[in-house]
Image (cartoon, helix red, strand yellow):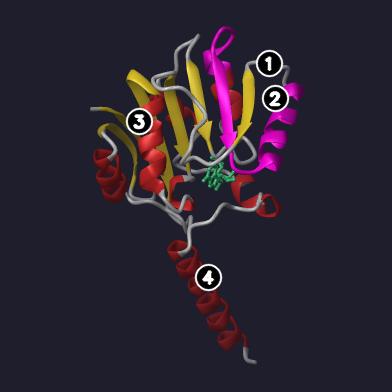
């Protein structure tokens, strides 16, 4: 096959795969973790900190931790009394982050395996929830947001991060709609069309 045709076929196959992924939400397998280990432009750790406004002593919940791109910083921002709950569908990701935390000498992280649509945490028990590049992987994202609303304390925050190019990218409009249906309203947005963090608060 000629190089141009080959390139065209590869581009078409990539597009078809991306469209299939969008229509079929599923968790990124641990074997493909190189995707989440890559730099996260626009949705940087500094931008997350500015939107989340973590305070020492808070109890944070990170859903969909991946290889912990944000986790160790989140744990440090609330240390020493604060705690980070790590929550993920896949044990391998939780183990990966806990190993990295031990290497950095952090002890205020606690891993729990489960599905975001059934959070094993009490009502109004968490100060803030972080969901980055995760919402679109959850087949029933609306149910996950209802669960987030349930576990948030009054005045708590949910920060959602999304990056264009992720086949499971959730648009700002769709996030606002889903959030409103779950009783969460948009309070602040940071970023641009290619990537953003949004802070939502209980209505
Ligand atoms: C694309 S990775 C994002 C990781 C990390 N937040 C980041 O930005 O680098 C998505 C993560 O969400 C987890 N995940 C997907 N569906 C989930 C669900 N229903 N409940 C809990 N975790 C889920 C996956 O196992 C994976 O660790």
Give the numbered dot on residue 107. 1
Q: Earlier in the sequence, mark 3 or mark 2?
A: 2
84 in magenta: yes
| First to last magenta residue range | 76-103
Horizontally, residue 90 falls left or right of residue 178, namely right
Secondary structure, mark 1, is loop
Q: Quadrant of residue 175?
A: top left
Secondary structure, mark 2, is helix
Q: Distance of mark 1 from mark 3, alpha carbons?
A: 27 Å
Q: Which residue is mark 4?
A: 17
Quarter of the rendering occupied by the C terminus: top left
For label 1, count other residues whose C-alpha is less than 10 Å away and answer few (under 14), some (14-19) or many (20+): some
Q: How many marks?
A: 4
State yes or no: discs 2 and 1 in contact (Cβ < 8 Å): yes
Q: Which residue is mark 2?
A: 101
Q: Is residue 101 above or below residue 31?
A: above
In front here: 37 or 78? 78
Give the numbered dot on residue 149. 3
Secondary structure, mark 3, is helix
Q: Is residue 112 above or below residue 138?
A: above
Q: Earlier in the sequence, mark 1 or mark 3?
A: 1
Quarter of the rendering occupied by the N terminus: bottom right
Q: Earlier in the sequence, mark 2 or mark 1?
A: 2
Q: Residue furthest bottom?
A: 1
201 in magenta: no
Q: Distance of mark 4 from mark 3, alpha carbons?
A: 33 Å
Residue at the spot 66% in from the left edge and 54% down from the top edge: 32
Q: Distance of mark 2 from mark 1, alpha carbons?
A: 7 Å
């Amino acid at each position: 096959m000629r190089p141009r045709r080959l390139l065209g076929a590869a581009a078409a196959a990539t597009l078809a795969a991306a469209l299939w992924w969008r229509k079929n939400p599923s968790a990124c397998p641990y074997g493909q973790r190189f995707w989440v280990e890559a730099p996260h432009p626009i949705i940087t750790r500094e931008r997350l900190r500015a939107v989340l406004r973590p305070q020492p002593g808070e109890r944070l919940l990170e859903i969909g931790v991946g290889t912990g791109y944000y986790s160790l910083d989140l744990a440090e921002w609330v240390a020493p009394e604060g705690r980070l709950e790590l929550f993920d569908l896949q044990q391998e990701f939780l183990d990966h982050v806990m190993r990295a935390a031990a290497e950095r000498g952090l002890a205020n992280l606690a891993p729990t395996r489960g599905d975001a649509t059934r959070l094993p945490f009490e009502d109004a028990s968490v100060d803030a929830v972080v969901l980055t590049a995760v919402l679109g992987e959850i087949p029933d994202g609306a149910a996950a947001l209802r669960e987030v609303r349930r576990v948030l304390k009054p005045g708590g925050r949910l920060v959602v991060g999304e990056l264009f190019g992720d086949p499971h990218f959730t648009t700002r409009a769709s996030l606002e709609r889903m959030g409103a249906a779950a009783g969460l309203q948009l309070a602040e947005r940071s970023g641009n069309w290619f990537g953003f963090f949004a802070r939502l608060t209980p209505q």
